[in-house]
Amino acid sequence: MARRGRPTVEIILSAEERSTLERWARRDSSSQALAFRSNIVLACAAGDATHAEIAAELGCNPVTVGKWRQRFGAARLDGLVDAPRPGAARTIGDDVIKAIVVETLESAPEDATHWSTRSLAKRHGISHTTVREIWRAFGLKPWREDSFKVSPDPDLVEKIRDLVGLYMSPPVAAAVFAVDEKPQIEAINRIVPTLPMLPTTPARATHDYERNGTCDLFAALEVATGTVITDIRKSHTSGDFVAFLNKLNREVPAELDVHAILDNLATHKTPLVHRWLLRHRRFHFHFTPTYGSWMNLVERWFSALTTKKLKRSAHRNVKELAADILAWVTTWNENPRPFVWTKTAEQILERLAGYCAAINADG
């Protein structure tokens, strides 16, 4: 039976086109639409998959796959970029736009650390809404400042590769746990009960509160399943940490090795802990780089605990706080949701190299 419909365009990529598409598909600065179109073209070039199969994999309509295959076949990379849309003619020249962008990036007013829309508009004799539109078009947000910390760890590269390998390709016959403590969790009770949410009005809580003691939460997140083993204690000394390791040892099947991802807290490296490790040979510790606790997935679980339970809870004493945490953990473990690590070690190191290059370029 003869095939009906529009003939399929064969996609054969040059090395440069493939490199560009892969970069567009993974770069944070790419728009979601451009990244999605790049993935469609890469899938079309990968083999003999039908439009329906590619659409099912990427979660779109087969017509969408055909559209961007045709566009790329006709105009190559330029076909994936949105064409300029018709509209009113610009009244601001390119020289003014360039001046706005350059001054935003390279200068500051005498009385502030960064430009505002109104101060820059006054300087150039244009409206502040025009400045805002220019900033939006170029992705400029001078009122914001992010922070970062380059790890001075001499074993940084090896540790990144080690941890990412545990997340993305765990060893056979072993359990991988992300382990850490959340210390000094406060049992806080509001002076006045929180007012409930109403239509057009959010829930309201008083600024003042009373502290009713603290507790420390030890947690081990199993990377593969998302289940969490916890222990609540009054402190987080090395003795408390060893007691938690004993609990972890009891709950993990004896035939499995245990790989624990930890930060560089001194409690994790005391002689008491070293002696415990000598007696439990199946345990293997993997430490995050210095200032690299963001690589410990259990931190993401602690964030969920804080935002979903602790942040807006009230407790009259530590006993109530502990019971509330354990109840939340029990509910979590009834339907655990593992956190999936997606960044490869090469992508992390490439991003780090970009930071270092920028720092060196600035002298």
Image: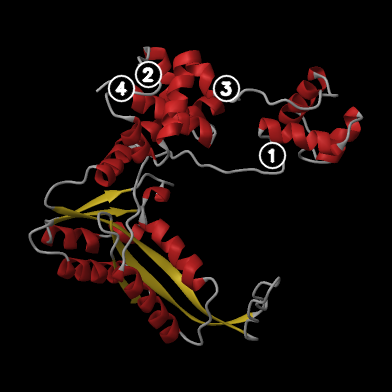
- Is residue 304 or residue 302 the one in the foreground? 304
Q: Say if mark 2 contacts mark 1, CB within 8 Å.
A: no
The CA span between labels 1 and 3 is 22 Å
Give the quadrant of residue 143: top right
Whether residue 340 is visible, yes or no, is yes
For badge 1, the amino acid type reads Lys
Q: Of circles 4 and 3, which is in front?
A: 4
Q: Which mark is residue 141?
A: 1
Choose between 183 and 294: the one closer to the eye: 294
State the residue position of label 3.
361
Residue type indicated by callout 4: Arg
Task: Give the residue at mark 2.
Answer: 7
On the image, the x and y values in percent for residue 304 come to 44, 63
Nearest to the eye among marks 3 and 2: give it: 2
Residue 3, numbered circle = 4
Image coordinates of residue 67 in percent, x first then y, are: 47, 27
Q: Residue at x 30, y 24 (%)?
A: 46
Query: Which tag is nearer the camera, tag 1 or tag 3?
Result: 1
Q: Along the line of sight, which residue is nearer the eye, 25 or 339? A: 25
Image quadrant containing the C terminus: top right
Sequence order check, earlier mark of 2 and 1 = 2
Residue 109 can be seen, yes or no: no
Q: Is residue 333 above or below residue 194?
A: above
Mark number displayed over residue 32? none
Q: How many marks?
A: 4
For the N terminus, the quadrant is top left
Q: Helix, strand, or loop for circle 1? A: loop
Would you identify the image quadrant in which residue 246 lies? bottom left
- CA distance separating discs 2 and 1: 46 Å
Q: Residue at x 21, y 58 (%)?
A: 274
Percent x, y of residue 92: 84, 24
Q: Are marks 1 and 3 in contact (CB under 8 Å)?
A: no
